[in-house]
Amino acid sequence: MEIKWLEDFVTLAETSSFSRAAEIRNVTQPAFSRRIKQLETWVGAPLINRATMPAELTPAGRNFLLTARDAIRMFYAARESLRPPAEQGLVRFAALHTLTITFFPIWLQELQRGTPRFGTSFIADRGGIEANLAALTDGEADFFLTYAHREVPFHLDRDKFAFLTIGSDRLIPVAAPQLRVETSAVPAAGILDEPETTKRALPYLDYGYGSFFGVALGRLFSKRAPFRRQAVHESTISAGLRELALIGAGICWLPESLVEKDLADGGLVACSHNPIWTLDLEIRLYRSSEKTSSATVEAIWQASKALLPDTGRPS
């Protein structure tokens, strides 16, 4: 038996909808249905009446619901109590890797001016959107720090998870000054604005489609001018792609905050000055609206609001 099966079951009981519950749990509906079936097999009784619309709990399901909720609470309480003393009391953040480098240190410094001193810990960036969101929805993290863009939906129940927009950034196309295209080295500055862009495949450092930036760029490329590209490397970590861009491996869309110094000293150049190739990003801080928070977590949320010019706009 897995704890996520219990969480799936409780979500289904609350929504009475397999499709809605699967969306909230960030899994496909077939995978969600399989997990409910696995739980029923483990319990030894049907928990859901699948012949009704909306879905209803069976008598066994109604009896088991309270047990499931208690088990979830006990599991996470036990895990918290067993954490090493050095980790207890730390505020847990799930965060995109780039933000831990560029945004978080300065933001934390500002934040701690208005709150009692607190420690922090990071859950490693898991690359994919759903995997990173799961750290928050599964209770592993107190906060999720992420980029956001209007074309990349986050499948979170707005009644259960609130966010603040606490900053902004831009994703811009950059490359080393000389870029190897086919058999020759060519200047990379403004290369996306040249007519030849549609005729030759440019070396491209790719995020893959499952990552946040990969999804955002996929939407950008589908709506903008033609861009012939040949993926020469794929990674979900911007900092790693930046290192490859610096040695001339290819064009890469990178957060402006990550490459400001590289652009200033000439290590990287902008591949276009046309705004159609730029993605404007929000930096968001998410938290659960339902789970009981510590006083420190609540203080951080309130201090984050206070840092915003209009005291914050929660979702």
Image (cartoon, helix red, strand yellow):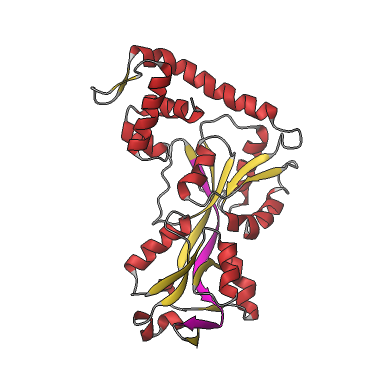
**Left-right relation of 120 to 6:** right
**Left-right relation of 200 to 237:** left
Q: Is residue 24 above or below residue 48?
A: below
Residue 151, image x and y in percent? Answer: 38, 57
> Is residue 240 in sight in this rendering?
yes
Residue 206 falls within the magenta-colored stretch = no
Towards the viewer: 156 or 134: 134
Residue 175, image x and y in percent? Answer: 53, 76
The residue at 48%/30% (across/down) is 4
**Left-right relation of 200 to 270:** left
Q: Is residue 63 above or below residue 22?
A: above
- Magenta stretch, residue numbers: 162-181
Residue 141, image x and y in percent? Answer: 59, 39
Q: Is residue 205 above or below residue 272?
A: above
Image quadrant where residue 62 sits: top left
Image quadrant where residue 267 sits: bottom right
> Is residue 14 in sight in this rendering?
no
The residue at 55%/66% (across/down) is 241
The residue at 53%/48% (across/down) is 164
Towards the viewer: 286 or 223: 223
Q: Main secondary structure of the magenta part?
A: strand
Towards the viewer: 151 or 74: 74
Residue 84, image x and y in percent? Answer: 73, 33
